[in-house]
Amino acid sequence: MKSTQIEYSAMSRGYYKSIVVQNKSVSVVKERNAEVAKSNIDDAKWNKIVDAYSKVNLESLSSLKAPTDKRTHDGAAIGNLKITKDGKTYETAGFDNGFPPKEIEQLVNLLVDFAKE
């Protein structure tokens, strides 16, 4: 996973969050134009991320169906998962923040945990 970058973002008119994981480090931005908070990821958490990532089918990422659609009427921020591996980018369609497609739920939840700390 050395050449892989995983980014989760969620945004709406009044909400912004960006979490980027790469090489056992994480960068978190909790609001627009805010400072980036960087930290290292401990081995236990990193192993969970690697395990969750290994279950994601990159080729089908763009076709995953969102389980809810509150984002269509400003009922939820728009969530997005983007994975860049070996220079190629794979990205989901937008989904409701907090309600990712089940195929990526474990990975997204691990990333969102960094913004809670």
Image (spheres, rainbow, N blue to C red):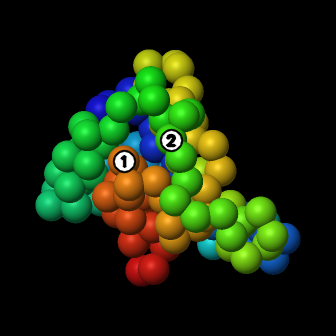
Q: Quadrant of residue 30?
A: bottom right
Of the image marks 2 and 1, the number of the one nearer the N terminus: 2
Disc 2 element? loop
The label on residue 64 is 2
Residue at 57% x, 41% y: name it.
Answer: 92
Disc 1 element? loop
Residue 84 in the image, given as x and y percentages of width and height = 50, 30
**Which residue is disc 1 drawn over?**
103
Q: Are marks 2 and 1 in contact (CB under 8 Å)?
A: yes
Residue at 61% x, 56% y: name it.
Answer: 95
The label on residue 71 is none
Q: Quadrant of residue 41?
A: bottom left
Q: Nearer the viewer, residue 43 or 104?
A: 104
Q: Is 19 above or below relative to 35? A: above
Left or right of residue 56: residue 48: left
- Quarter that holds the N terminus: top left
Residue 9 in the image, given as x and y percentages of width and height = 61, 57
Residue at 56% x, 33% y: name it.
Answer: 62
Residue at 44% x, 24% y: name it.
Answer: 59
Going by the numbered disc 1, the residue's amino acid type is: Glu
Left or right of residue 62: residue 13: right
